[in-house]
Amino acid sequence: MIEVITLGESMAALRGHGPMRLGGELSLSVAGAESNVAIGLSRLGHRVSWIGRVGADQPGELISRTLRAEGVDVSGVAVDPARPTGLILFEKRVADLIRVRYYRTDSAGSRLHPDDLAGVLAGGARLLHVTGITPALGPGPRAAVLAAVDHAKAQGWTVSLDVNHRSMLWPAEAAAEVLGPLARRADVVIASPEELAIVEPEGYDDLARADRLLTAGVAEVVVKLGADGARVHHGAGVEQVESVRVPVLDTVGAGDAFSAGYLSALLDGEPTGERLRRGTVLGAFAVASDGDWEGLPTREELPLLSLEPGTTIR
Ligand SMILES: Nc1ncnc2c1ncn2[C@@H]1O[C@H](COP(=O)(O)OP(=O)(O)O)[C@@H](O)[C@H]1O
Ligand SMILES: O=C(O)C(=O)C[C@H](O)[C@H](O)COP(=O)(O)O
């Protein structure tokens, strides 16, 4: 039985090293916030379904094949013959500074429609995970997210929202109008401090903003703090954990990895402190390896980062 349903757009991902205008080699993979989370959860043994549209092209095949290979249910993936699969370029300008460009306007993924959800939603789940990227893609994806949340709430599933504001897709004011009300319907809201101010502009600091969301009915407000770790605000107070010290190779994907770790521990019935810890462990795996999701751990690999740096296992 599926535990987690998520929906969004995944793209063919091209990664280069150094300034892209100089040419050189690119590596081809897959990226998309929700499919990154789906892969992270699947590697930890959870049954996850990803819903989205891909084009009738080789990048679309790559997305379906990659997710299937990672054990993610793709029965809700639709092939749209009229539109291409979107593309994302990652330019590693210097070691820890990455520039992202999207080529996703009018892509197949941006044509997601509420009707695409019916089959997978009917199968049931425990948790629906959505992000603030999908509503920015167009009216169809926005309606799909709202319909999925309506369904999840009616069924009593847990709803998590990663605010994931992408300023290249929409300005903060436009995002706030849609994501503010959406956040108030979620059980778990995951955000950076800047994103928290988008969904709750009224408070004067993180604590005040989180309190307003808790009063509105959110159970857990999780604030990601990059290399400083993460914090959760809930009815019983505030907890914070440090990040796991690792050499930084590629910071993109840390937030999605964190979400996967946090939600995995939530699904396991672990308390909030352990949810934070598993989130930071996955975030550390993500920053210490190339790619959005390639370096994420299996459940057996979770303790690996507590070994001495430089350890060889033989
Ligand atoms: N340099 C780092 N070293 C170790 N862990 C990190 C580092 N950067 C991020 N993380 C982990 O990943 C989590 C998410 O990263 P963050 O940068 O806050 O999210 P986002 O990628 O969405 O901006 C952090 O809470 C932290 O646990
Ligand atoms: O789908 C999009 O629009 C994306 O931007 C895909 C990104 O590669 C991931 O969402 C990584 O994001 P972080 O985990 O916050 O670093």
Image (cartoon, rainbow, N blue to C red):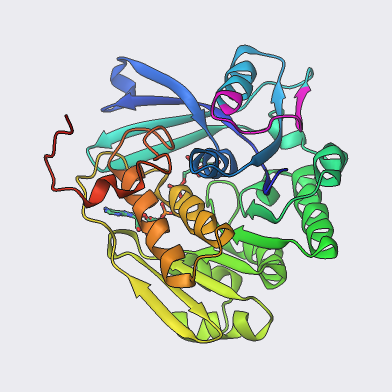
Between 300 and 125, the residue placed more toward the observer is 300
Q: Can residue 106 be seen in this view?
A: no
Relative to residue 54, is residue 299 drawn left or right? left
Rendered residue at 77%/58% (across/down)? 149
Relative to residue 237, is residue 201 drawn left or right? right
Q: Quadrant of residue 95?
A: top left
Residue 89 screen position, x and y as percent? 45, 29
Rendered residue at 64%/53% (across/down)? 129
Rendered residue at 62%/53% (across/down)? 131
Residue 242 screen position, x and y as percent? 28, 66
Q: Is residue 189 magenta?
A: no
Relative to residue 41, is residue 299 drawn left or right? left
Residue 115 screen position, x and y as percent? 88, 40
Up the image or down, 238 lies above or below 255; here it is: below
Q: In which quarter of the image is residue 81?
A: top right
- The region drawn magenta spans 67-79
Residue 188 screen position, x and y as percent? 60, 67
Between 70 and 64, the residue placed more toward the observer is 70
